[in-house]
Image (cartoon, grey):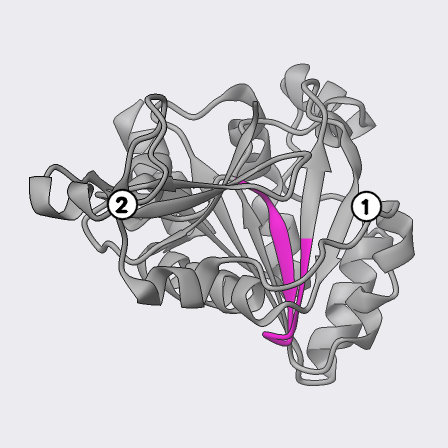
Amino acid sequence: MTLRFIGTTSESGDCPTLYEIEGSTDILIQGDRVSNPERLAQLRDVKESETFVTVPRDLLVRFAPRAERNPMVPFQEVAHMFREFKHTAFRLETRRGYATDRNGATWRRWQAGEEISVEPVNDWRRNVADQVAQGKRFERVRLVDSPPTEGQRFLLATGLGNVASGEDIRNLPRAEAERLGLPDFDFWLFDSRVVARFVFDEQDTTLGVVLSEDPAEVLAACQARDAAWHHAVRTAEFQRQVRSSM
């Protein structure tokens, strides 16, 4: 049973919290157990296996999914959104490594000790530069472990090249992200209107994305973006912090 964090109204990292049970339409609720005898006596048809928790109504209103989840589609089917968004494309990166990085030629040069901070302009960076020139914003927050994983150190090494193309890439310690209650999955958020949530296999390979315009999911993504952005550190400064701690 795989759980996907949906959201919480707690600011201290405590319960109550909602999770989606992947592969089903069920929601798992984490909250304080009800122990008041008078309240328990008023419950109906109680089974021995059941327990009961209390949650704020606001938690369900804000985070419980309200629509059928869309099917997963190949990432290529959403590629046009990186050209057609109107204002802001925001990415939250939560994984400790990505197969697309490990399978690339730049990864092999990095492992060989070559300098990779300045790489030739590719299609991604060319599009970023084009969109930023039109007044749009590409923003990204990457979670980083302590110490950083190999995959995270690679992204720190290549990050300034993307920044030079126009991306605003910032980094956030994973412990801080957990304190803030950020999601544990990757997504793109386009114009605060459409969420594209990534689906990975156990080898960090992207299987596809799930698009959603559900108000509850979009709101949760916007709140995660705002919290992450407020606490994240720009790439160049974060690189200096990591080097000074190693």
Residue drawn at (81%, 45%), measured in percent from left and top?
A: 72
Where residue 59 sits in the image (x, y, percent)? 35, 60
Mark 1 is on which residue type? Met
Name the amino acid, label 2: Leu
| Residue positioned 68% across, 15% down in the render | 112
Q: Which residues are magenta?
A: 185-196
- Judging depth in this view, the residue of 32 and 159 nearest the camera is 32
Q: Where's the C terminus, which quadrant?
A: top left
Q: Is residue 109 left or right of residue 152?
A: right
**Which mark, residue 36?**
none
Instruction: State which quadrant residue 44 falls in.
Output: top left
- How many numbered marks appear? 2
> In this rendering, does residue 81 appear at all?
yes
Question: Looking at the picture, how far across and down is residue 192, in whole percent?
Answer: 59, 74
Q: Is residue 239 left or right of residue 205?
A: left
Q: Is residue 164 above or below residue 207?
A: below
159 on left or right of 11: right
Q: Quadrant of the N terminus?
A: top right
Residue 178: percent from left, percent from top? 32, 40
Q: Secondary structure at mark 2?
A: loop
Residue beneath the point at 82% across and 26% down: 105
Q: CA distance from mark 1 to mark 2?
A: 39 Å
Q: Is residue 186 magenta?
A: yes
The answer to which image quadrant residue 119 occupies is top right
Find out whether residue 170 is within the magenta segment: no
Tell me if mark 2 has few (under 14), some (14-19) or many (20+) residues whose alpha carbon lies within 10 angstroms of its own: few
- Would you name the residue on which mark 2 appears? 43
Q: Secondary structure at mark 1?
A: loop
Q: Earlier in the sequence, mark 1 or mark 2?
A: 2
Q: Between residues 76 and 124, which one lies in front from this camera angle? A: 76
Q: Inspect this view and state whether residue 36 appears.
A: no
Say which mark, if any, is on residue 72: 1
